[in-house]
Image (tube, grey):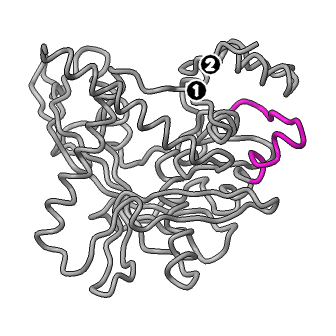
Amino acid sequence: MKTKDLLEQAFLEMQAERSAKEETKLGILRAGNAGLMDDGQFAGACPRTAYLRMIGQEVNGVDEDQNLMLEGGLGNEDLWVSALRRKWPGQIKQEEEIPIAWHTPNGTKVTGRPDIVLCDAEGMPVRGLELKLICSVWTARTVLKGEPKLSHLTQAAHYSWKIGENYCGGKPLEFELWYTSRVNWALVGWMQKHFPEQGAPNSEFIDYKEERGYMNPFRIQPFRIGFEVSVGEKLEDLVRYRQIGTRDWKESIVSRARIADFYDFVSKMEPEKKLGPRPRALKIGGDKENYSPCDYCPLNDICGEKTTFEEWKTAVAERLTGEE
């Protein structure tokens, strides 16, 4: 068989395995869809796509191109674990080895699998790690400015909270969010003004060259940047973060209460026939992003604000499964 055929058939087998796993999770909400709800508005994730995943309808299916990026993320985790096993004196648990589970007020189950949890010799969690492989130059820009993405901090806070409840007697687990970029990113023209100037924090990860008397960034080197995550003592406390190696904590719009409200809303969408508004694209501190997350969703044109729940659900089924 040709190499191309081998890879295509392997991809189809992996797709079938993913579909089989999803069928075992019908009726369950996922930590990977963690979002925020505040004053009837959503951010960090879309409640509609979270609901659809719960009923077995994947909005953004994995095609062969996306699979390359997915495999890159998994490979990044393997590289991290390989390095950590050399020096961490206790146990290292991943994914299914240390899952989380909890229930919304109406009994809907929420589950998740953290990337890495460093444990002591007896297996008690000590520190959690949420890992992100940077696959976009714009994510690299956000991180190099000293900020995590809102959706990523929401996931990390969710795991810190629930691992603490499930395994640590209720105290949130110490958690870190790490970004790894394993390629060179070229910066040209108008892009250059969006990245740190020479001498600014994180500029050590950027190469500069002189142009008309000014040092312009022209390439981002491979880098690794981490953030400490502090969820606070109360559910309403806003989650704080700071780049590892810096002193000052910064406040986000994430809170455990807002995460809980998000899942509570999604769990009631079906019985209450409510769609809720579209999610907003917000930065970590609440400022608006300059794009809409709906622009990247294949359901954008059928997610009208005035569409009823049943009309929307029927249209989604026709779009995703071909059912009428």
Q: Is residue 114 above or below residue 33?
A: below
Which SS class for mark 1? loop
| Closer to the camera in the image, 30 or 225 | 30
Q: Residue at x 58, y 38 (%)?
A: 282
Q: Which mark is residue 320?
A: 2
Foreground tag (2 vs 1): 2
Magenta residue span:
264-278
Q: Where is residue 4 drawn, in percent x and y?
A: 18, 15
Amino acid type at circle 2 is: Leu
Count residues near mark 1 (Cα–Cα under 10 Å), then give few for <14, some for 14-19, many for 20+: some
Count residues near mark 2 (Cα–Cα under 10 Å), then give few for <14, some for 14-19, many for 20+: some
Q: Where is residue 81 drawn, in percent x and y?
A: 21, 60
The residue beneath circle 1 is 59
**Image quarter (top left, top right, bottom left or bottom right) of the N terminus:** top left
Q: Is residue 200 magenta?
A: no
Q: CB atoms at circles 2 and 1 under 8 Å apart?
A: yes
Q: Residue furthest front?
A: 1
| Closer to the camera in the image, 303 or 255 | 303
| Closer to the camera in the image, 121 or 14 | 14
Q: Residue at x 59, y 33 (%)?
A: 281
Q: Is residue 271 above or below residue 116?
A: above
Q: Is residue 123 left or right of residue 291?
A: left
**Residue 98 picture quarter:** bottom left
Q: Which mark is residue 287?
A: none
Q: Where is residue 140 drawn, in percent x and y?
A: 31, 36
